[in-house]
Amino acid sequence: MRRYQILWVGFLIVFFALSCARKEVAEHKVVTPVPRVEKAAPKEKMPEELRARPIEEAKIREEELARERMLKEEALKEEIAAFEEEDIHFDFDKYNIRPDAAEILKKKAEWLKEHPNVHVLIEGHCDERGTEEYNLALGERRANSTKQFLIGLGVDAGCISTISYGEERPVDPRHNEEAWAKNRRCHFVITKY
Amino acid sequence: MKKFIPYSLLFAFYLLLSYTFSYARVYIDINKPGQEKIPIAIPVFLAEGKGSDKIAKEMSNLLKKDLDFIGLFYILPPEAFLGRSIEKRIDFRKWYLIGAHLLIRGKIKVDENTIEAEFSLYDVKLGRRLVGKKYYGRISQYRYIVHRYADEVIKALTGEFSIFQTKIAFVYNVSGNKEIYLMDFDGYNPRPLTHLNTISLSPTWHPKGDKLLFTSYRGKGPEVYLLELKSGRIRRLIHYPGINIAPAFSPDGKNIAVTLNKGGKQGIYLVDKDGHIKMCLVKHWGINVSPSFSPDGKRMAFVSDRGGSPQIYILDLTKKAINRLTFEGGYNTSPVWSPKGDLIAYTGLVNGYFQIFTIRPDGSELKQLTYDKVNHESPSFSPDGNFLAFSRNGEIYILRLFDGYFFPVGKLPGMQTQPRWSPRLRY
């Protein structure tokens, strides 16, 4: 008997909590647009049709802004995807920035300077040849020289962090020169924007 | 309350009745190459108790396998001495006539879950017992009873214990992750030590054999973790910003050498057992990695690219001087100092393939040990200094230094890399 009582009380509590939660959500939906509408509406009394227009206009403006924001966000996301997609590559057992990599890094530096809120993580990678430990150290040097290069181009050092994955995360798992060339790389990940 | 029986105590459980005859004569000098193999007879052990026949056979086969591992014996085929195993009084003359110089006899008694085993090694020519031991333990642990006796046999013949009471830690890629694993020296009983579901690398033994360090990506980047074998407890130990890789205990086990990045420069630092930096050992704009101490702790081998390619260097810790050790080849890495201090083994690139080499710490006597056109990496000395474990195309192999013979152990699917041989653990 007692167990049933407890169950009932529990059920009631859950029910109450759920109904409260639903109310809160519903209220939120109503509350947010209201102050803006009030601001937009003139203080004097107006006929119903006239009053409706500014509300609609505000709504449209709001929607437009939201759309603009969304487009901007989407554009930024695309830029980030493009930024992340382009790796730079290294010669075997080397961590100096090659001329082709320097061109890419210049582009990246410009973009980073235009977006000062962006934080980038540089991942240093190696091909599978050589010992794991040496490659961890080599990957660190690759990420580090890439970071130094970007700093040299005026990117804020505080926005760049590095990690070495050594030979642990190849993009191409095959065991040939083509795969190795792809795997000797620095990869870029935007961690904050 | 969890009931917990430590591994070492389990083995201490074996009642050991020692009636060893100490012998001055050294039968085998393991360091002398080209000597003849000693013919040894190991008849199937006498068995008493329910189901003991099968165990006796397995145990005698394992003892043969152990002694064969060393490569110093010619194990006589059983056809040579059919019917001779059950004789009550040993007729040494007959054993000598079939060519045996040494003879091991054993007797086991099985009772429910326990086993009593008694073994004796005889010099057939002299008709004398060299070492006899009696063990008592659980049946499930019979392998370790055999390994213990095998160690006593080698001790009696060479003056030093062998590798029968050691294990090998290694990195094993399972389900896309790399975990730290442990197996017996002969590849038996591989088991995971970590379940971190990330990349874990570079296991390194504490000189006492009760702890391991390793590098793992469990946190933000590569950091060094400490694993206590008894409890299985894992603790993050060295976690400076940047990298924390390739740790190595100093021979006294009090300090750890590790590669860190401080102020954009990669260096090898000495940290204490809690991970606090004591001093910088090596610092340079390039790569500095893979430290390995000499057994006296006075020198440290490491890898650097300061000369334009990865080469092995030796830091003299008292003189603070750095000297280049390797000049042959354009890519030499992963140095390990031998337990006796006489050799450094490493991996070197030859015509596109990585091979195992040894060299004396003064740079003399460079020897290439492997030649096949596959990659041989990450050598690790056995604690007696007579073997090297290494990975060969993702499989763990063991190489006998005195005759250069090597063979796979473990034989697991997937990739096994970075084998690290434990100190002698005393089963």
Image: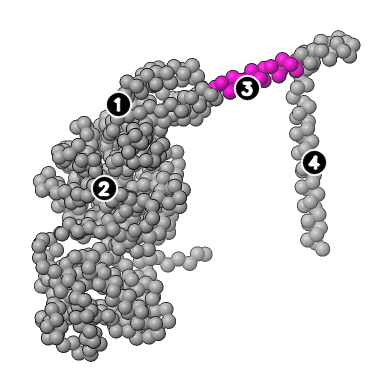
Cα–Cα span, label 2 and label 3:
54 Å
**Residue bearing the label numbered 1:** A96
Residue A70 tag number: 3
Q: Residue extending furthest bottom? A: B88
- Label 3 environment density (alpha carbons within 10 Å; few <14, some 14–19, many ≥20): few
Cα–Cα span, label 1 and label 4:
63 Å
| For marks 3 and 4 on the same chain, the one whose residue lies earlier in the sequence | 4
Residue A19 tag number: 4
Cα–Cα span, label 1 and label 2:
29 Å
| For marks 1 and 3 on the same chain, the one whose residue lies earlier in the sequence | 3
From which residue to which does the magenta span run?
A: A58-76
Is residue B395 located in the magenta-colored stretch of the structure?
no
Give the letter of the chain under mark 3: A
Above or below, B151 relative to A68? below
Provide the secondary structure element on which disc 3 rests: helix
Whether residues under marks 1 and 2 lie with C-beta atoms below 8 angstroms apart, the answer is no
Provide the secondary structure element on which disc 1 rests: loop
Report the side of B414 relative to B186 (left or right): right
Point out residue B181 in the picture as x, y percentages from the top left corner.
38, 55
State the residue in front, A75 or B179: A75
**Residue bearing the label numbered 2:** B374
Provide the secondary structure element on which disc 4 rests: helix
